[in-house]
Amino acid sequence: MTAAFLVDAVRTPVGRHGGALAGVRPDDLAAVALLLAGLPTTVPGTTVSRLCGSGLEAVVQASRAVEVGDAGLCEQVTWSR
């Protein structure tokens, strides 16, 4: 099995329910930051919505994908409302 390593993490902005960010899609919040980081558009990604557990769930999903050979690099978007 391939070892997986967490290299970096970025958290999308968190807002109040129904607040200024209510109409913004979570993947749109992260897309610009990822492109500015130099990641190509070919890097697969997914959105995770598990409220407070989103960040940890994203790490677990990415780790599994790398360890079993489904991915070499993962980008995950998490958000809480």
Image: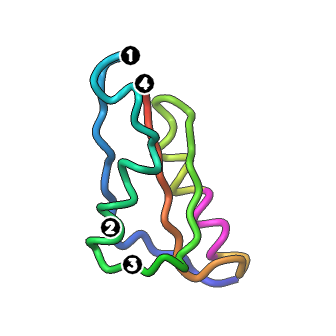
Callout 4 secondary element: loop
Nearer to us in this view, 65 or 48:
48
Q: For mark 2, what is the residue?
A: 8
Q: Quadrant of the N terminus?
A: bottom right
Q: For mark 3, what is the residue?
A: 39
Q: For mark 4, what is the residue?
A: 81
Q: CA distance from mark 2 to mark 1?
A: 28 Å
User: Which region is colored magenta?
Assistant: 61-66
Crowdedness of circle 2 by 10 Å Cα count: few (<14), some, many (20+)?
few
| Quarter occupied by residue 69 | bottom right
Give the mark, 4 or 3, whose residue is nearer the N terminus: 3
Callout 1 secondary element: loop
| Quarter occupied by residue 64 | bottom right
Callout 3 secondary element: loop
Give the mark, 1 or 4, whose residue is nearer the N terminus: 1
Give the mark, 1 or 3, whose residue is nearer the N terminus: 1
Task: For the residues labelled 3 and 2, say whether their Cβ atoms are less than 8 Å apart.
Answer: no
Residue 18 relative to residue 47: left or right: left
- Quick check: is 62 in the magenta stretch? yes
Q: For mark 1, what is the residue?
A: 17
Q: CA distance from mark 1 to mark 4?
A: 6 Å
Residue 63 relative to residue 70: left or right: left
Residue 66 coordinates in the image, percent (x, y): 62, 75
Which three-letter amino acid code belongs to the residue tagged 2?
Asp
Which three-letter amino acid code belongs to the residue tagged 3?
Leu
* Residue at the (51%, 36%) spot, across then down: 53
Residue 80 relative to residue 11: left or right: right
* Residue at the (55%, 79%) spot, across then down: 42
